[in-house]
Amino acid sequence: LYVTGVYRLSPVPGGEADGFYRSTGAFQGEGCGRYYRAGSFGTPLYHGGDGAAERLFLQLLGGVTDYFQRVYERCLREYPADLTVFYLPTIDEASHEWLGFVDEECRMYDPSGRYEELLASAYRDCDRAVGGILDRVSSDTPVVVLSDHGMVGCRRNVYLNTLLESEGFLTFTAEGDIDLAATEVFYHPAENGAICINSDEFTQGIVPTSRVKTLKVEIQRLLEHYRDPQTDEPIAARVDDMDAQTVKNSYVYGDLFFIPGSGYSVKALASPTGRVSEETFKSGTHHFNTGRSMMNGIYFIANGPGALKGKRQTLKNLDILPLICTLLRIPAPGGIPESSALLQLFSKPKEPS
């Protein structure tokens, strides 16, 4: 047995929480990978196990999929809507545990095929859930399957704010938070690649505007030349100056953008051991741009009128809102343009005669 958090469903239409619980069962939102890595399910394969721990973890993930399917069925049956959005964590959880063992560019790569089959089991579970939705909607109901990110393999965590603290640029509070009143530079807690200069143009900023440019150069040089003390490998593939970037129609946050070296996952919290880098067996990571295609999400139209079956098209997360508006036949808000990439996923309707 293991203990999860306590959750409340909110909001449930019409105050029907009790009925919702009775028809779907207790909330199951995760397969508890941290217990798998800790050996609570038995010895993992990567520590010499026989696969029993992985089978139990997949069984728990299957229970998560079953729970979400019950939620889908209840929502589709009792809460008709113009737009219904479902989420399933199965593939994300499995990939966080095993992606590094199937990524040929990661030093954890295992060519045996054992981890490919484990991940394939998670994909089959997800496919079963999508199939359940398709079985319950009409042929003219558009169904879009997408992910908000991809994933790459990693074998080590690098704690950028611990590095910045060791170099005198950042201070943590006793609780482990960033003390902005005593911090010049920090890696953003969103862990999205953004490194921020705490300029005095911000409420709690302490860096004079006149020093920002010089400080950026100093930090960029530090991170690009820093080598992992345990492996002697560079932690950064590169560090971009965001003032020098031209990103059309995109929102850019941060003064510098950190792109990690191969096999590294970047953390914003204080290192639990005080070391800048630590080995990890949570072998899949995302949140930042490595430039590799594995970080791209997936998008395809699974059902609906005008959908071009088998059509593949490169899209961006920013294309999803126009897609939804197109499917609902409503204008996109705020003057957001219609995406030509999305239109290529549909055949053009015939003009009325």
Image (tube, rainbow, N blue to C red):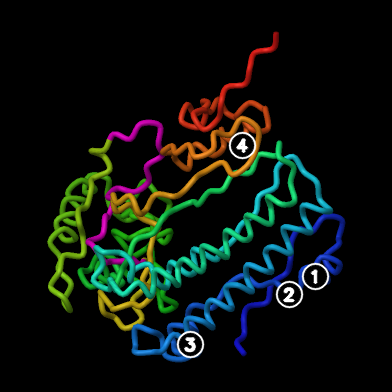
Where residue 98 appears, as percent x and y from the top left, is 40, 71
Residue furthest toward the top? 353
Q: Which mark is residue 21?
A: 1
Instruction: Please rate how many residues cluster around mark 3, counting C-alpha atoms within 10 Å: few if below 14, some from 14 to 19, many from 20.
Output: some
> Tag 4: residue type?
Ile
Tell me which numbered mark, 2 or 1, is placed earlier along the sequence: 1
Cα distance, mark 1 to mark 4? 30 Å
Q: Secondary structure at mark 2?
A: loop
Q: Between tags 2 and 3, which lies in front?
A: 3
Residue hosting label 3: 52
Q: Between tags 3 and 1, which lies in front?
A: 3
Tell me which numbered mark, 3 or 1, is placed earlier along the sequence: 1
Q: Is label 2 in contact with label 1 (beta carbons under 8 Å)?
A: yes
Residue hosting label 2: 26
Where residue 327 appears, as percent x and y from the top left, is 64, 33
Image side of residue 115 versus residue 197, left or right: right
Where residue 252 appears, as percent x and y from the top left, is 37, 42
Cα distance, mark 3 to mark 1? 31 Å
Where residue 31 appears, as percent x and y from the top left, is 56, 75
Please provide the residue range marked out in magenta: 246-267
Of residues 321 and 190, the one drawn nearer to the viewer in this rendering = 321
Tell me which numbered mark, 4 or 2, is placed earlier along the sequence: 2
Residue at image location 41% in from the left, 61% down from the top:
189
> Tag 1: residue type?
Tyr
Q: Secondary structure at mark 3?
A: helix
Of residues 64 and 325, the one drawn nearer to the viewer in this rendering = 64
